Amino acid sequence: MYWNQEAETMPREQLRALQDSRLREAVARAYNNVPAYRAKMDAAGVKPGDVRGVEDIERLPFTEKTDLRDAYPFGMFAAPMEEIVRIHASSGTTGKQTVVGYTRKDVDIWTECMARCMTQVGLTSGDIVQVSYGYGLFTGGLGGHYGGECIGAATIPASTGNTKRQLQLLEDFSVTGLLCTPSYAMLLGDAVREMGIADKLKLRVGVFGAEPWTDAMRVEIEKRLGLQAYDIYGLSEISGPGVSCECQARTGLHVQEDHFYPEIVHPDTKTPLADGMPGELVFTCLTKEAMSLIRYNTRDICTLRRDVCPCGRTFARMGKLTGRTDDMLIIRGVNVFPSQVESVLLGVAEVAPHYLIVVDRVNNLDTLEVQVEMTEAFFSRSDAVRSIEALEHRIAREIQSTLSVAAKIRMIGPGQLPRSEGKAKRVQDNRKLV
């Protein structure tokens, strides 16, 4: 399959004209084929003819995840079922799953976006790529698979699980590219160390996504697996992985702007924010046929910039995600994101990158506890018992300084926290159980 690499470097004024044209088509498609959108737009007093281009996008209503759940299973589809060739569903843990449909053209666009992503991190037809995202209703595995095959790389559908087999494939097949979640990359890195096979691996590129991760975690992954680690972003509702991805310059994640129009809005007022200001990330699907989502609020928090990247690409770049407004913890009036805790822990040499944040409410007061594993080296020290208390106090001071909220730190032995082969579970909020 051919993919349009030239689009990635088109002048911004040419890109804007393309976005305007495609937005008009997308709005008309949604209004004419999705009753929920027709009702939303009628309530807002907007008709498809009122939208001339991107300058009018603020007139359009937002789409929320609740809209998709209310329309379960196929109420948001803008194409008839006889044109749907693929159905995926989100991995949500509350309420009904969000169901996503794809036409043949949608699958081709998804493939094109993933091919662009893999090319811009340096993967080629000469690479052997192991896809260790899950295959199934989750979009990660098939998205990576499409991209790998499209660029001509030898693609291994390893899926998740069976870490011993994963390592055997990495070693025996001389794998050069790895796709999985960053938390699973850390797990694989730990296993590589334990087995002492680091010098036998040929890995050079890792493409990791499906959960937020910090630059400090990037350093740890690169150290363990001996590769260059790149961030990729996507979500089932919009397409799947490949909505945006870093390039080799690693100055942000290039958004596939000819297919997905990005905005940043204020979390409270929902008004658009200027480039460089952090807020909620919103996407409008410009070319999707099966689900023409309009101003879909992802609730992910990041920034946008539209200057030309050192790599020459002109597409807007997302900053790394700093959290989500709907997984943000409010503890005694303070906003806390798991990524902030992670950034502190990854700066402490004596602890492993495995932790659990436990929030509770005692006597009407919110409490924060962070359970964190000690490294094997620290745990084995003769003075470990005497040193644990000092280490807990040191981490508590760092978290207090970073988050402006007190936390109890509980050190536990290596390997005691559950491991994840998919998205890592980092938060246990017991207040929701009351």
Image: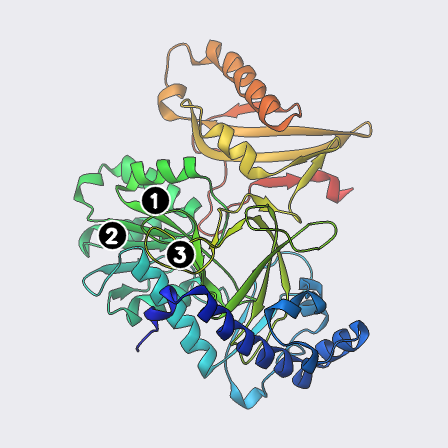
Q: What is the x, y in percent for residue 119?
A: 30, 61
Q: Indicate which disc, 1 or 2, sits on the residue closer to the N terminus.
A: 2
Which amino acid type is marked by label 1? Leu
Q: Residue furthest bottom?
A: 82
Instruction: Give the distance between the C-alpha atoms of the residues marked 1 and 2, in whole angstroms.
Output: 10 Å
Q: Can you name the residue that lies furthest to the front here?
A: 13
CA separation in Å, label 3 and label 1 = 11 Å
Q: Residue at x 58, y 20 (%)?
A: 396
In the rendered image, which residue does mark 1 sit on?
A: 188
Tag 2 residue = 170
Q: Position of residue 412 (x, y in %)?
A: 50, 26
Residue drawn at (41%, 77%) of the image:
108
Q: Residues within 10 Å of mark 1 (few under 14, many from 20)?
A: many
Estimate the spatial distance between the alpha carbons at disc 2 and disc 3, rounded to whole Å: 13 Å
State if disc 2 and disc 1 touch (CB < 8 Å). yes
Label 1, secondary structure: give it: helix
Direction from residue 20 to residue 105 in the image, left or right: left
- Depth order, front residue of 303/164: 303
Q: Quadrant of the C terminus?
A: top right
Q: Looking at the image, which is closer to me, 405 or 200?
A: 405
Q: Secondary structure at mark 3?
A: loop
Q: Is residue 239 above or below residue 364?
A: below
Q: Is residue 197 visible?
A: no
Circle 3 residue: 160
